[in-house]
Amino acid sequence: MKKILVVNPKGGCGKTTIATNLSSYYALWEVPVALVDCDPQHSSLEWLDQRPSDLNPIVGVDGSKGKLNLKLCRTGCCGCPCADH
Ligand SMILES: Nc1ncnc2c1ncn2[C@@H]1O[C@H](COP(=O)(O)OP(=O)(O)OP(=O)(O)O)[C@@H](O)[C@H]1O
Ligand SMILES: [Mg+2]
């Protein structure tokens, strides 16, 4: 499993833009993608909510609580790259 960390302490420098574009790119090529949003603003999860459902799936995970909420991965999603599968 490949993990890409997008991190920068500076606000508004393009973290969400990079993370959502990378997620879209890999999903387009049918690579299973989990997008973990560690920012309490949840910008990328809000983006995911608005993403058309007919596109290849991206699993959103709220990582802002300090511990990854992998419950989302047990709700019947397919192609999730987490350790639960
Ligand atoms: N490569 C780029 N060129 C020009 N504008 C960009 C680029 N990447 C991002 N932006 C713009 O910069 C703004 C901030 O981007 P983004 O929200 O991705 O940053 P962020 O680091 O996630 O911000 P925050 O710290 O608030 O979470 C947005 O309006 C976005 O469209
Ligand atoms: Mg952001």
Image: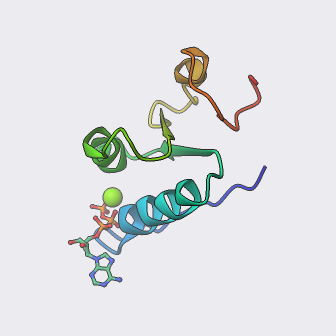
Instruction: Between residue 21 and residue 29, name the one nearer to us.
Output: 29
- Identify whether 16 is placed above or below 68: below
Location of residue 78 by image quarter: top right
Instruction: Between residue 69 and residue 28, name the one nearer to us.
Output: 28
Residue drawn at x 46%, y 44% is 38
Does 29 sit left or right of 13 as displayed? right
Residue drawn at x 53%, y 33% is 66
The chosen color scheme is rainbow
Q: What number of labels is visible? A: 0
- Identify whether 48 is placed above or below 23: above
Does 1 sit left or right of 55 as displayed? right
Residue drawn at x 58%, y 30% is 68
Q: Which residue is outermost to the front?
A: 54
Residue 47: x and y in percent read 29, 48
Residue 4: x and y in percent read 64, 60
Residue 84: x and y in percent read 74, 22
- Identify whether 53 is placed above or below 16: above
Q: Which residue is outermost to the bottom?
A: 13
Location of residue 27 by image quarter: bottom right
Residue drawn at x 60%, y 16% is 74
Instruction: Between residue 68 and residue 31, name the one nearer to us.
Output: 31
**Which image quarter has ligand 1?**
bottom left
Instruction: Between residue 51 and residue 72, name the one nearer to us.
Output: 51
Q: What quarter of the picture does the C terminus occupy?
A: top right
